[in-house]
Every structure is written in structure tokens, then in C-alpha cells.
Image (tube, helix red, strand yellow):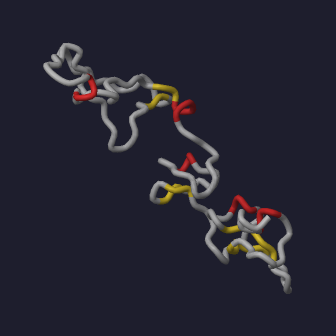
């Protein structure tokens, strides 16, 4: 091993691009291969270094519900729960389809008081107002 260099990023606007439970392997350029191919190496296709990058270039943002996330600011709903963007559950009031969790749509009731709530997708033959109300298999 030549050296191990550990440093913090220079400012609060930067972040190390290694995710949770990820790490950089020791770069062993002088490692000798006595048999086989480079694929037998412990560092083959592994991250051996990382450089601080500006946060806004690293983090995903405005992800729809159901997408994989790391932090709350990744999601359009600002809620990352168990690595998944979430918002409103079935039966909760909504304003638009993106307010609802995946496989739900913001649908209006056809009876008084005509409120809109997150509901399961409409099945074939059911009332709907637009394509987003229906399962992808039904429009």
C-alpha cells in the first residue's frame, strides 16, 4: 500500500459522493497477479478514490413518489421513508395525482361533498376523469 489519505470536504456546499454503506477500496497499483485475470483482483471494478463534489450536482431532487431516495430533499414530497419517496396514503385528501403514493391517483368522489382523495387506480369499466385515474393496463 502506498498511502491512505482521509480529508473532509472544503465547504458545507460539498459532499463525498459515497453513499451509505459504501466505501473506497485501497488502491493497490503494485498488486501482483500470479495467476488468472485482473477480475481475480480484490479491487477489480471497485471504487478506489472519491472526490468532493457540489451537493446540488450530487443529490437527486424532485423525485416522484415510489422512487428510491436517500434523503427527504430528494423527494418532491419532501418525505423519504425507508429509502422510498412517499406522500399521501389511500383515503387522504389530495390536490393532484403527484400528491399520492405510487399506484394511487387523486380521484374525486361522485357524491356530495365531491372531495378529492388518494384512491386505488380505477379498474376497467369504472368512472374516471383522465388517464391518470386508471391502471396503466386500462387506458
Residue sitting at 22 percent across and 21 percent down? 4
Residue nearest the observer in this picture, 138 or 37? 37
Residue sitting at 45 percent across and 59 percent down? 82
Q: Position of residue 33 (x, y in %)?
A: 17, 19
Rendered view: 83 above or below 50: below
Report whether 98 appears left or right of 73. Answer: right
The quarter in which the C terminus is drawn is bottom right
Residue nearest the observer in this picture, 131 or 17? 131
Report whether 122 appears left or right of 82. Answer: right
Rendered view: 112 above or below 11: below
Q: Position of residue 50 (x, y in %)?
A: 37, 25
Residue sitting at 69 percent across and 62 percent down? 99
Residue 11 picture quarter: top left
Residue sitting at 83 percent across and 72 percent down? 128
Counting the numbered discs, the total is 0
Residue 106 picture quarter: bottom right
Residue reaching furthest front? 36
Rendered view: 10 above or below 19: above
The quarter in which the N terminus is drawn is top left
Report whether 74 appears left or right of 123. Answer: left
Residue reaching furthest left? 34
Rendered view: 135 above or below 40: below
Q: Position of residue 98 (x, y in %)?
A: 70, 58
Q: Position of residue 9 (x, y in %)?
A: 40, 25
Residue reaching furthest bottom? 112
Report whether 111 appears left or right of 82. Answer: right
Amino acid at each position: 500500500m502506498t498511502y491512505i489519505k482521509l480529508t473532509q470536504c472544503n465547504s458545507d456546499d460539498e459532499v463525498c459522493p459515497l453513499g451509505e454503506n459504501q466505501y473506497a477500496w485501497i488502491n493497490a497499483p503494485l498488486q501482483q497477479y500470479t495467476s488468472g485475470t485482473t477480475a481475480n483482483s480484490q479491487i477489480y471494478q471497485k471504487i478506489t478514490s472519491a472526490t468532493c463534489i457540489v451537493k446540488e450536482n450530487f443529490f437527486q431532487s424532485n423525485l416522484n413518489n415510489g422512487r428510491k431516495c436517500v434523503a427527504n430533499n430528494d423527494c418532491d414530497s419532501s418525505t423519504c421513508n425507508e429509502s422510498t419517496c412517499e406522500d399521501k396514503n389511500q383515503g387522504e385528501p389530495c390536490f393532484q395525482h403527484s400528491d399520492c403514493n405510487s399506484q394511487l391517483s387523486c380521484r374525486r368522489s361522485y357524491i356530495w361533498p365531491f372531495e378529492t382523495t388518494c384512491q386505488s387506480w380505477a379498474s376497467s369499466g369504472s368512472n374516471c376523469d383522465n388517464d391518470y385515474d386508471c391502471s396503466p393496463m386500462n387506458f
